[in-house]
Image (cartoon, grey):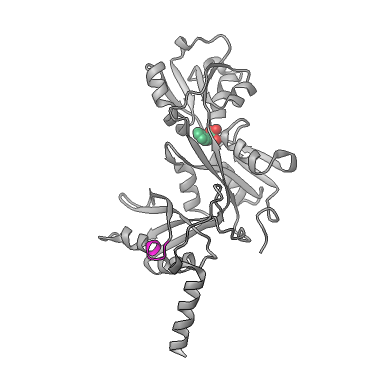
Amino acid sequence: MTSTSDRAPRTYAYLGPEGTFTQMALDAWAPSAGATHRPCGSVDAALALLRAGEVDGAMVPIENSVEGGVSATLDALASGDPLVVVAEVLVPITFVLAARPGMARADVRAVGTHSHAWAQVRGWMDANLPEATYVPTLSTAAAAAGLAGGDGEQAAYQAAVCAPVAASNHGLEVLAEDIGDNAAAVTRFVLVARPGDLPERTGADKTTLVLFQRDDHAGGLLELLEQFAVRGINMSRLESRPTKASMGSYCFSIDIEGHVLDERVGEALLGLKRVCAEVRFLGSYPAAHGTAVRVTPHTTDEAFGEARAWLHSLRA
Ligand SMILES: O=C(O)C(=O)Cc1ccccc1
């Protein structure tokens, strides 16, 4: 088994352009001094480069402590050629309101930014720019770039919500600092790769899955979740996403504590495989917080091993 650093990919795509929070996550995981970083216009574009074999990994946002899951990422991982998460990075987020030099805050009629950024500054906007409308952009840095380019004067918005570095990259003036509604806001980014060697088991791991039910019936979700409950597995994220096959058809995107090499996780996967139409394994990787998973005495690898040996002795 190789360690995460042994198998570290060398060329990485990320949600760009330069100055996104995703770039900060990638810099934290693999500084650009030792790797090639390729900015992409969207999460889909970054994952397409990865699926085409043009890069070794892609850093994308997956979840925010304020707004929840990033649908574009969850959906892109739930379908298409298989990809797996090999690492996660947590980045604390600070937003500024930036505009072309000379623009007064009172003249801002529309604000451009990424939907997850808008969700995190809505309170500040209501209090300070209640008349401003929202213009969605593919990233916070794309909003800043849109103001700074030659077409800045024609941009559909007069200010961007972005990272301080995106404002300074584009020579924008900061009209207001630290405008996030929640000072503790953290975004979780994942480094995605094509399936290959599993990251090493550390004892502080997460596993990401997408579960598709066989049919819609009473207790269907409970049937899936009890596979974790009876094996002492804690979930750290659960979201339902439309399968897009028909109205009312959902799959479940789930993070659990533990590694596929843990006996209790392996047993849960066997149970899920029996009850689900499809189980998509999206990787086991070290949890960013590094805190060891709490395992109850009857769900340790040894407990599963002893039970299996006992059954074996009965059958023999
Ligand atoms: O647009 C960015 O800068 C991103 O990296 C995506 C994002 C947007 C808002 C909060 C966290 C990440």
Residue at 41% over, 58% down: 211
Along the horizontal axis of the image, is 140 left or right of 122?
Answer: right
Q: In the image, what residue occupies the spot 47% across and 72% down?
A: 303
| Residue occupying the far front of the picture | 297
Q: Is residue 120 left or right of residue 198?
A: left
Residue 172 lies in quadrant: top right
Question: In which image quadrant can residue 271 be found?
Answer: bottom left
**The stretch drawn in magenta includes residue 231:** yes
Q: Position of residue 314 (x, y in %)?
A: 43, 88
Rendering coords of residue 265 (x, y %): 48, 64
Q: Is residue 185 magenta?
A: no
Left or right relative to 50: residue 298: left
Q: In the current view of this chain or complex, which residue is farthest to the left?
A: 218
Give the quarter of the figure containing the N terminus: bottom right
Q: Is residue 273 above or below residue 158?
A: below
Q: Residue at x 51, y 38 (%)?
A: 187
Residue 122, percent across and down?
40, 26
Q: Residue lying farthest bottom?
A: 316
Q: Is residue 198 visible?
A: yes
User: Percent from the top left, x then y, of residue 166?
Assistant: 60, 26
Q: Is residue 129 visible?
A: no
Q: Which segment is the magenta one?
A: 227-232
